[in-house]
Image: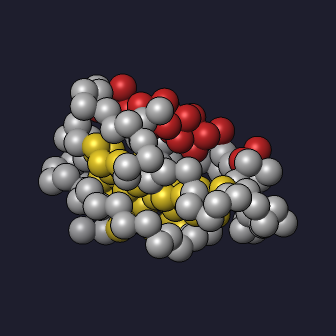
Amino acid sequence: MTALILFFGLAQSTTQLPLLALPEGNSAWVIHVVSTGGLLGNGGGDFAISSEGKAVCNLQLRCPTDFKPSDFQPLVEVIGTRDLHIPATPIVSLCRDCITRTMTISHRDSTGVLHTYSVSWDDTTKDKLPPQIIRIYDAVRELVK
C-alpha cells in the first residue's frame, strides 16, 4: 500500500492518552489532539476520535459517548488532496505560556492510500493554519467540551 505522509511540526507530550488505532478498511480515519504547556504546564486536555465512533479523552475533558462519524467524513477527506495548502515553513511561536496543540489526522482514502497530517500551533499561531485544519479541530473540540 502506498502511503502519502504530510508532516508539519510535532510537539511532544508527557500526557498518557490511550491512542486509537486507525480502523480497518478504506475511508477510515482517526484524529488525535495532544496539548502541552500553558500557565500550569499541563496543556488543555488530550482527546482522540475515530471513524468507528470511538472516543478517548483524558480526565480534564468530557468525552463524547455518542457522535456521528459521518459528520466528520467530509472534513477528514480533505487530507491528501491538493486543496490543502501546507505552509512551506514550520509555524514558530514566541509565546512561552501558551498551550500548544498538536493534531494528527490519519485517513485511509477510498483507494486505500494512507494520508497523515500532523500540525502544532498555539493561540498566537492558529491563524497560520489552513482553514480546513481549523474546521476539523474546532468540530472535534466542540465534542469534548
In the displayed structure, would residue 5 be above or below residue 43? below
Residue 143 in the image, given as x and y percentages of width and height = 42, 31
62 left or right of 1? right
Residue 105 visible to the viewer: no
Residue in the image at 61% along x and 40% along y: 134
* Number of callouts: 0
In the displayed structure, would residue 48 be above or below residue 68? below
Q: Quadrant of residue 95?
A: bottom right
In the picture as drawn, the residue positioned furthest to the front comes out as 40
User: In what quadrant of the picture does the N terminus appear?
Assistant: bottom left
Residue 125 visible to the viewer: yes
Residue 114 in the image, given as x and y percentages of width and height = 33, 60
Residue 43 in the image, given as x and y percentages of width and height = 57, 57
Residue in the image at 19% along x and 52% along y: 23
In the picture as drawn, the residue positioned furthest to the left comes out as 24
* Color scheme of the displayed model: secondary structure
Residue 74 in the image, given as x and y percentages of width and height = 41, 32
